[in-house]
Image (spheres, rainbow, N blue to C red):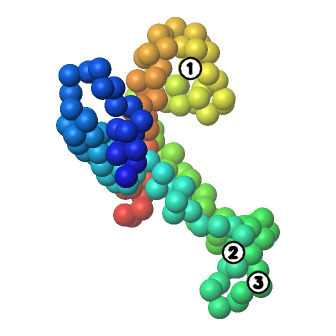
Amino acid sequence: MIGLYKAIRDYDPTRQASFRSFAELCVTRQLITAIKSATRQKHTPLNSYVSLSRSASLEDEGERLLADILAVKGICDPAEIVISEWESARIRQGFTEVLSSLEARVLRLYVEGKSYQEIAEALGRHVKSVDNALQRIKRKVEVQIERCRVC
């Protein structure tokens, strides 16, 4: 219906095309656009979020909110601290094994909050070189995280 409405709105009788062929083209293009929009995965993270305002368990309506649990949750258990440190060390070791020296320096500066331009100036590289390094880092980090999940 939207495609037909647009065909009625935009049809120019001074052109050589008949209204029927113009309307068919408009409707077809509108259907293609609708299908592409419906199958796009762009907003999946936003549409599949977990609300921090809901209760922590399904049975306890209104008891404790996830936001309250996360805010209060501090690691007090010594075993949790040791495991957390061990996991952090393992991740750091994995990064040092897979990242080149340039990538490690770029990552360090990027984590410090430097812009692409500032990183490029600090390392004496082009901005595109910094961008390429960050893209490689992203791919390697994703592989490393997946590897750690399997372990």
Which amino acid type is marked by label 1? Answer: Tyr
Which amino acid type is marked by label 3? Answer: Gly
Query: Is there any visible trace of residue 80 in the rendered image?
Result: yes
Q: Earlier in the sequence, mark 1 or mark 2?
A: 2
The residue labelled by disc 1 is 116
Marks 1 and 3 close (CB-CB < 8 Å): no
Q: Quick check: 94 left or right of 16?
A: right
**From this viewpoint, which residue is outermost toward the bottom?**
59
Q: At numbered mark 3, what does the secondary structure look like: helix, strand or loop?
A: loop
Q: Residue 47 or 59: which is nearer the viewer?
A: 47
What is the CA distance from the residue labelled 1 to the residue labelled 2?
39 Å
Marks 1 and 2 close (CB-CB < 8 Å): no
Neighbour class for label 3 at 10 Å: few (<14), some, many (≥20)?
few
Q: Which of marks 1 and 3 is nearer the N terminus?
A: 3
Q: In which quarter of the image is residue 17?
A: top left
Q: Which of marks 2 and 3 is nearer the N terminus?
A: 2
Q: Residue 95 or 118: which is nearer the viewer?
A: 118
Which amino acid type is marked by label 2? Answer: Arg
The residue labelled by disc 3 is 62
Front: mark 1 or 3: 3
Q: Could you say where residue 36 lies in the image, as x and y percent from the top left?
A: 33, 47
What is the CA distance from the residue labelled 1 to the residue labelled 3?
45 Å
Task: Please tell me how many numbered marks the rendered image carries.
Answer: 3
Query: Is there any visible trace of residue 99 in the rendered image?
Result: no
Q: Which mark is residue 54?
A: 2
Judge whether 122 appears above or below 137 on screen: above
